Amino acid sequence: MDRFVCSGLASLLSIVLLLTMASCSGKTTEDILSESRQHYDDGNYNGAVVLLKNHLEKNPEDIEARYLLAQAYRSLGKWTQVRGETETILSSKPNDSGCLLLLAEAKLRSGNVSGALETTRAAHEAAKDEEETVKALSLMGEIAMMANDPDLAADAFREILSLKPE
């Protein structure tokens, strides 16, 4: 129990320290994004969230920071926050297939299967390259299986195989 309390206090102190450092420093947007990415890459998603939320309070139009925040929330399983961030991004970039896929996953993980399928179809239509197309089709196949639609799942997976036969 004491170890748990100490670990919780250490986490809380590191978040407070990150907040203090971020608010007091004269860091550029690039510095903050770089530091946030490093936290994210290191698996310190909460640290990334703290830095990005603080940055977005001052720079709410920073789409790159908002997208990284949505990804950090995804890694934490905070699907409501993922939806909020991706919907904000999509209000200014409605055909961003990566963001649409992130929103579709958030809808799916929140139990909105039909909304996830609709959003995945939009991501598939907006896909700019083979990689984005395959990601959209893969998610579409997963959703179709969950929705008990084997024909749609088979179609999605067949299309993936036609793009990537290996």
Image: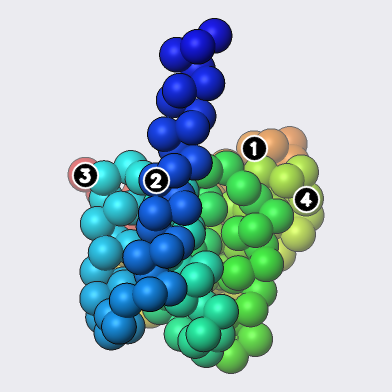
Residue 102 placement (x, y as % from top left): 54, 60
Where disc 1 sits, the SS reads helix
Say if residue 11 shows up in the picture: yes
Q: Amino acid at mark 2?
A: Ser
Q: CA distance from mark 2 to mark 3?
A: 45 Å
61 left or right, relative to 148: left
Q: CA distance from mark 4 to mark 2?
A: 35 Å
Of residue 55 and residue 43, the one placed in the foreground of this image is: 55
Q: Residues within 10 Å of mark 3 (few under 14, many from 20)?
A: few
What residue appears at the point 60 percent right and 59 percent down from the top-left corner? 82
Which residue was labeled with disc 4?
Answer: 112
Q: CA distance from mark 1 to mark 4?
A: 14 Å
Which residue was labeled with disc 2?
Answer: 14
Q: Are marks 3 and 4 in contact (CB under 8 Å)?
A: no
Which residue was labeled with disc 1?
Answer: 145
Residue 32 placement (x, y as % from top left): 31, 73
Name the N-terminal-most of marks 1 and 4.
Answer: 4
Where disc 2 sits, the SS reads helix
What residue appears at the point 54 percent right and 9 percent down from the top-left corner? 1
Name the N-terminal-most of marks 3 and 4.
Answer: 4
Residue 166 numbered tag: 3
What residue appears at the point 50 percent right and 71 percent down from the top-left corner? 54
Residue 27 placement (x, y as % from top left): 28, 80
Name the N-terminal-most of marks 4 and 2.
Answer: 2
Q: Are marks 4 and 2 in contact (CB under 8 Å)?
A: no
Of residue 74 and residue 48, the one placed in the foreground of this image is: 48
